[in-house]
Image (tube, grey):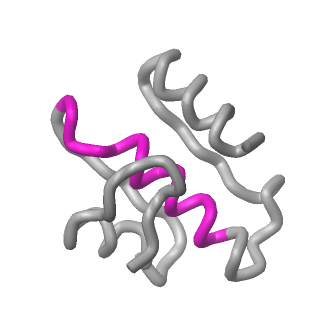
């Protein structure tokens, strides 16, 4: 199972989002459900599959989540 390096294993729903075979993906979930962890894992999976990082548009609604995702991408 693919998981982030610094978090718990992904749930079945998170894993489905990470492995989504199509293009665009909209994830709507409540607070504390692991969206940031799932997004970091999805970006990592896309890059592993050969997607150029500059071709990925990742959007989040909070500055905190955006900062966490940038930190995870650099690390």
**50 inside magenta stretch:** no
Q: Position of residue 24 (x, y in %)?
A: 49, 63
> In the image, is residue 36 above or below residue 12?
above
The image quarter in which residue 43 lies:
bottom right
Which residue corresponds to the image point at 73% horizontal and 43% vertical from the top-left? 75
Total marks placed? 0
**43 inside magenta stretch:** yes
Which residue corresponds to the image point at 44% horizontal and 19% vertical from the top-left? 62
Q: Position of residue 39 (x, y in %)?
A: 47, 51
Which residue corresponds to the image point at 53% horizontal and 56% vertical from the top-left? 5
Q: Position of residue 34 (x, y in %)?
A: 29, 45
Which residue corresponds to the image point at 67% horizontal and 32% vertical from the top-left? 71
Along the line of sight, the residue nearer the viewer: 41 or 9:
9
> In the image, is residue 57 above or below residue 51?
above
Secondary structure mostly seen in the magenta stretch: helix
Horizontal side of 57 relative to 32 (left or right) equals right
The image quarter in which residue 32 lies:
top left
Quadrant assignment for the N terminus: bottom left
Q: What's the magenta region?
A: 31-46
> In the image, is residue 36 above or below residue 10?
above
Query: Which residue appears farthest toward the top when viewing the image?
Result: 63
């Amino acid at each position: 199972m693919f998981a982030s390096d610094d978090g718990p294993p992904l749930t079945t729903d998170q894993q489905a989002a990470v492995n989504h075979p199509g293009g665009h993906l909209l994830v709507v979930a409540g607070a504390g459900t692991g969206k940031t962890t799932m997004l970091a894992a999805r970006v990592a999976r896309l890059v592993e599959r050969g997607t150029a990082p500059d071709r990925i548009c990742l959007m989040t609604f909070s500055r905190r989540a955006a900062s966490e995702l940038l930190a995870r991408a650099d690390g």
